[in-house]
Amino acid sequence: MYLQSPEEAKRYVATLKRRIKAAPAAEAWLAPSFTLLPAVAGACKGSRIKVGGQSVSAHEGGAHTGEVSAAMLKSAGAGFSLVGHSERRAMGEGDEVVHAQLMAALQSGLVAVLCVGEEERRDDGWHFVHIEAQLRTALVGVHPFIDKIVIAYEPVWAIGKSAADAMTPENVEEMVIFLRKTLTEIVGRTAAHKVPILYGGSVEGENARVLLASGVNGFLVGHASATVDSFIEILKACKK
């Protein structure tokens, strides 16, 4: 909810479109609030910036007040949706709900960015068990849609910290290996290696380049994307 009016969102997009030329190899996706989707999608037309939703309903329609369906997202100009973001999970969206949302997005033709991650930092391996459970529940029946899935790993405990206090590149690399291994067990090796893996947890311009060397394919950026200046620094780090 960093940007709240269509005018503010359009100004953001106009600036981003102008400055993204400094990061020619980077791909930028924007997930604005539902009310801003049409304005952002319209402003991004003709550019390489993709637009999507922050969440999606598991329901196609009917008496579900406050919900926004995949079809509604598409009609507003979305090409993807986040699913299972940590802030949505904190509001009570459990693994079964996330699975239903994921399937609704995929069956409608949207790309689904599935968010997984642990709430607290622990050294006993609990986070691996937790994340494996999230993946296995969410990815039941996704084989026909594997080319429309992106995995975003967001360790909740690392969000809001400085780059120096967030996850180390070694920790991120370990998680990427684990995610690839688990994906291979669920969908097979060939399909698993088609799935992009993003990292989200206090990503800034100063640590983006070194985190990319950990094997991630990109980032799920939170507060640092609220201003074009900080977002562009991350995009520049993705030049390779």
Image (spheres, rainbow, N blue to C red):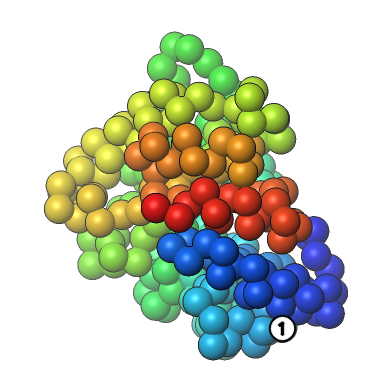
Please report the residue visible at 40 percent of the width from the left and 65 percent of the height from the top.
Answer: 103
Count up the numbered dots. 1
The residue pinned by badge 1 equals: 39
In this view, the residue farthest toward the top is 124
- What residue lies at 24% left-to-right and 36% top-to-bottom? 181
In x, y percent, where is residue 220? 55, 50
Question: Is residue 81 or residue 58 the one in the foreground?
Answer: 81
Left of 64 or right of it: where is 153?
Answer: left
Residue occupying image coordinates x 20% and y 43%: 184
Would you place residue 174 above or below residue 148 in this image? above
> As drawn, is 140 to the left or to the right of 20?
left
Q: Position of residue 96 (x, y in %)?
A: 46, 50
Residue in the image at 64% along x and 23% along y: 165
User: In the image, is residue 40 above or below residue 164?
Assistant: below
Task: Judge by depth and name the residue closer to the eye, 157 or 20.
Answer: 20
**In front of the other: 59 or 162:** 162
Q: Identify residue type, mark 1.
A: Ala
The N terminus: image quadrant: bottom right
> Residue 213, image x and y in percent?
39, 37
